[in-house]
């Protein structure tokens, strides 16, 4: 993954014996190891401001979302579940969207960067495979593609915290603060719920 300023690429490699996170300049040069806590760190994503990294770490057999300050190297495990994957920062950099498993089903969950607030996005109809977490800062308003699902219909509840318009991601309808529900089907059509 590219850093927000496009100057570095973050990736996972086991060149040191176990999966760890590295970065390399787009201009070339040697790769630098970034993660040092633990023996298994994968799926790096850099925050929009370029100061923080989130990734999946294995802790006592559990795969959890971990955040690392890139300047101080301090880390914090943000989740207490066991099968987390595919973290992605929200456009504002204050929350992280990720996939996890609850009751044998894949769901999308959100955790704040301080780890205090956690919630699941409502998914009644099928397994969520991974969050897409795409943000296009050049787009008008803020755009966030929430996830890829395995079955035809999913209800997702979304709250726009800053009152900024949020593109529903499929038909160009806008959501303002207080409007929280959209229904998506496999053909990428949405209707207000």
Image (cartoon, grey):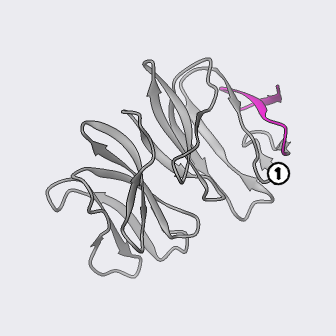
* Left or right: where 175 falls relative to 91: right
Q: Residue reaching furthest front?
A: 116
Residue 176 quadrant: top right
What residue appears at the point 34 percent right and 80 percent down from the top-left corner? Answer: 28
The magenta stretch is: 177-193
Which residue: 24% across, 53% down? 38
Check residue 189 for magenta coloring. Answer: yes
> Where does the image place residue 131, in percent across and percent down from the top left?
54, 40
Residue 162: % across, % down: 78, 54
**What crowding class fits label 1: few (fewer than 14 Cα within 10 Å), some (14-19), or many (20 or more)?**
some
Looking at the rendering, in which quadrant would you find the N terminus? bottom left
Query: Which residue lies at the image location 53% right of the left edge and 53% below the top edge?
Result: 114
Q: Is residue 91 above or below residue 56?
A: below
* Left or right of 31 on screen, residue 87: right
When the figure is inspected, residue 172 is found, relative to residue 75, above or below; the finding is above
- Which quadrant does the C terminus fall into? top right
Q: Position of residue 48 (x, y in %)?
A: 58, 65
- To which residue does mark 1 refer? 165
Please indicate whether residue 140 sits to the left or right of residue 53 in the image: right
Which is more toward the observer, 190 or 66?
66
């Amino acid at each position: 993954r590219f850093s927000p300023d496009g100057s570095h690429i973050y990736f996972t490699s086991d060149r040191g014996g176990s999966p760890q996170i590295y970065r390399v300049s787009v201009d070339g040069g040697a790769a630098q190891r970034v993660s040092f806590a633990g023996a298994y760190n994968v799926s790096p994503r850099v925050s929009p401001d370029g100061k923080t990294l989130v990734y999946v770490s294995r802790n006592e057999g559990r795969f959890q979302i971990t955040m690392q300050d890139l300047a101080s190297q301090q880390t914090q495990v943000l989740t207490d579940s066991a099968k987390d994957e595919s973290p992605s920062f929200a456009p504002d950099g204050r929350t992280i969207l990720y996939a996890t498993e609850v009751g044998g089903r894949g769901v999308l969950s959100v955790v704040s960067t301080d780890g205090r607030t956690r919630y699941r996005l409502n998914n009644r109809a099928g397994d969520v495979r991974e969050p897409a977490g795409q943000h296009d800062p050049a787009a008008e308003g803020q755009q966030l593609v929430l996830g890829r699902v395995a079955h035809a219909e999913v209800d997702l509840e979304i709250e726009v915290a800053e009152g900024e318009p949020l593109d529903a991601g499929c038909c160009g309808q806008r959501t303002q603060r207080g409007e929280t529900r959209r229904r998506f089907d496999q053909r990428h059509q949405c209707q207000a719920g």
